[in-house]
Image: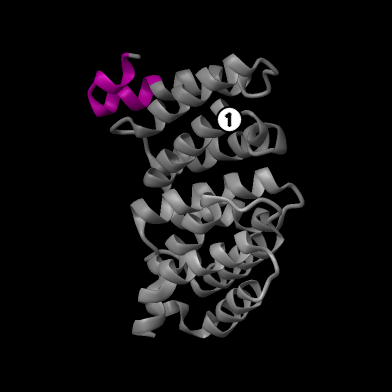
Amino acid sequence: FLIPLMDAEYAFHYTKEVVVILIREFPSPDEEMKKIVLKVVKQCCSTDGVEPSFIKTDILPEFFRHFWNHRMALDRRNYRQLVETTVEIASKVGASTIINRIVDDLKDENENYRKMVLETIDNVMQSMGASDIDQKLEEQLIDGILYSFQEQTVEDEVLLNGFGTVVNTLSLRTKPYLPQICGTILWRLNNKSVKVRQQAADLISRVAPVMKVC
């Protein structure tokens, strides 16, 4: 793929040309094609000279419409590529732009899809922090991760990692939500299932540093 090797001015020009063709392939039902398209989108968005405003207006609407769905969460290869591509886009357009689009899906009925959403948020916040996340989005994040954690049917490292990252990245901003978080943990510590209790204990170890400073 030659575009990333070009000067910024030329790279942006040719990226715009490529994106027109790419978007035509977004609806393709072919799983292999989806993976290729996602890789090319990632490369285009990471290229020097490609403006955030172009990504927001020309790529994001169709990208989320065609790729962010339950079907993608079921295919592990496409799931992984979608998370990577979305994180790359976030590095160009900002964490809050991406998280705002998917945060409500932390309450989606599909557990696999919720995990994909949380893993993406986890990776975005790890790499970009929480400086552009406002109070409303902060509240949605805490509400969403609590819901995902409470509604899980299979204990999963993705949930622990995501929960820990959100709380630790927000740091002192987590203080108003600690009663809710502690209530959820205590309820699970009293569960009959050993696995549920163990996971609650694991979560305490992840959020303890923030609880200490708050």
The residue sitting at 34% across, 83% down in the picture is 213
Q: According to the image, label 1 marks what residue? A: 76
Which residue lies at the image location 51% right of the left edge and 26% below the top edge?
Answer: 38
Direction from residue 36 to residue 113 in the image, left or right: right
Q: Residues within 10 Å of mark 1 (few under 14, many from 20)?
A: few
Q: Position of residue 195 (x, y in %)?
A: 61, 59
Examine the image and state in which quarter residue 140 appears.
bottom right
Observer-nearest of 95 and 117: 117
Name the image colouring.
one colour
The segment highlighted magenta reads 2-14
Q: Say whether residue 68 is magenta.
A: no
Residue 98 visible in the current orientation = no
Q: Position of residue 98 (x, y in %)?
A: 51, 50
Quadrant assignment, res 132: bottom left
Left or right: residue 121 compared with residue 8:
right
Quadrant in which the C terminus appears: bottom left
Q: Amino acid at mark 1?
A: Arg
